[in-house]
Amino acid sequence: MAVKTCLMVGGGGMAGGWINRMTQKFGDRIKIIGLVDVNQDVLDRQAQALGLSKDQLFTSHEDAVSAVKADFCGVATPPPFHALATVAALEAGMPVISEKPIADTLDAAKDMVRAAQKTDLPCAIIQNYRYARNKQELVRIRNEGRLGRLQHIVGRYACDYREFESWGKAWRHTMEFGLLFEGSVHHFDMLRFLSGGDPDTLMGFGWNPEWSSFDHHSSGMYLVNMDNGTHTFYEGNSSAAGITNCWHREHYRAEFEEGTVEIAEGATVTIHRVGEEPEVYEAPEIEWEGHDHLFDEFLNWLDGGPPSETRIEKNIISYAMVIAAMETTLDGQPKKIADYISDLELKS
Ligand SMILES: NC(=O)c1ccc[n+]([C@@H]2O[C@H](COP(=O)([O-])OP(=O)(O)OC[C@H]3O[C@@H](n4cnc5c(N)ncnc54)[C@H](O)[C@@H]3O)[C@@H](O)[C@H]2O)c1
């Protein structure tokens, strides 16, 4: 496998994490040859770390995509900037791997889907939480029918972000529907992954407790029925003060025909059967976890391997759940997920 060159859009925050991963774990497969960031200090710091010269540094993606011809482009800026950079990179002939959520609006997300379809280039979206030992094990239990058929799944996310800027950046506290776009997009995607179904109808409520550090709703509860007959329920709370199930510790409870599976922290899986002691064990190791899995999968795709499971044409469904949750919160009406994406021609 030849080393793939990368134009990286974003250099600090999560993008800084990407760069560390790319250089430390994927140094033999990825070489960053161009970097874009609106913050000059970030550019200077990363230029030194990556050994990039001035002509490889950019403050705008437009200049970067016309100057740098890389094997792919990585996008890890805040959501409002994903679509412009992604579409420009695809149109310049570069496959893209981008952070979640796909974009800041449904129209922008669809622009990205259409650009990927028009150019026929790989475009993958990060959904790192799928690639954790306990999540993979729950899916195996379902697929192998170890506890019979699945009835429903309850997912719970609860972080104590009652202090302003405790969720990383100020923009997460001031944006509209921060819970849904920054948080729940992961959990909606997880409910699809764990249930093995795609969403049919979504309904629910969102609110902002008076003591919230957010300008907009920090909390919500949503119900979704899936196209494989299963049902899911989600509790999201960024103003949690008691029992927390924050990142990597979200609690999922899957109700099967012959027992209940509970997962939360680490690799522990607990199976409950009526009248029996709970069975508690550690899920098997997996080769790549989180972002590493997605990078490996994407690089393999570029080399002719199978497309990423969370390619944009599939992940748009998780994103549509966010838009549906936003709209049901506003008007109190159930939303058909298909209505949000019916103008796209999606390959399965
Ligand atoms: N998958 C995960 O677990 C996970 C976790 C955290 C964040 N994220 C995602 O990562 C993305 C970035 O979030 P963050 O907290 O790192 O944001 P951030 O505000 O720290 O920005 C990241 C970098 O992008 C730069 N930047 C901002 N606007 C830019 C633009 N227009 N062009 C180029 N560079 C620009 C910033 O200067 C910064 O260096 C978001 O989409 C977020 O949802 C994902």
Image (cartoon, rainbow, N blue to C red):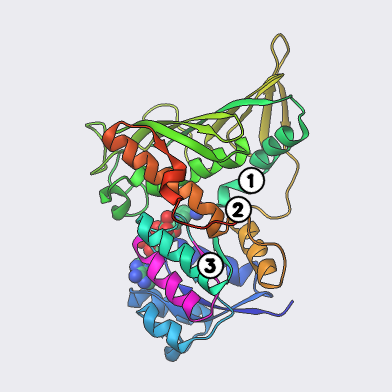
Nearest the viewer among 103 and 225 is: 225
Label 2: which secondary element: helix
Main SS of the magenta segment?
helix
* Residue at x 47%, y 57% (from the top left corner): 344
State which quarter of the image contains the N terminus: bottom right
Q: Which disc number belongs to residue 290?
A: 2
Which one is closest to the eye, mark 3 or mark 2? 3
Q: Which disc number belongs to residue 117?
A: 3
Q: Amino acid at mark 3?
A: Gln
Q: Earlier in the sequence, mark 1 or mark 3?
A: 3
Q: CA distance from mark 1 to mark 3?
A: 30 Å
Beta carbon of the mark 2 residue lies under 8 A of ligand 1: yes
Is residue 116 in the magenta section?
A: no
Check if mark 1's residue and mark 2's residue have beta carbons within 8 Å.
Answer: yes
User: For mark 1, what is the residue?
Assistant: 132
Q: Position of residue 285 (x, y in %)?
A: 74, 46
Q: CA distance from mark 1 to mark 2?
A: 6 Å
Q: Position of residue 227 (x, y in %)?
A: 57, 36
Label 1: which secondary element: loop
Q: Which residues are magenta?
A: 80-98
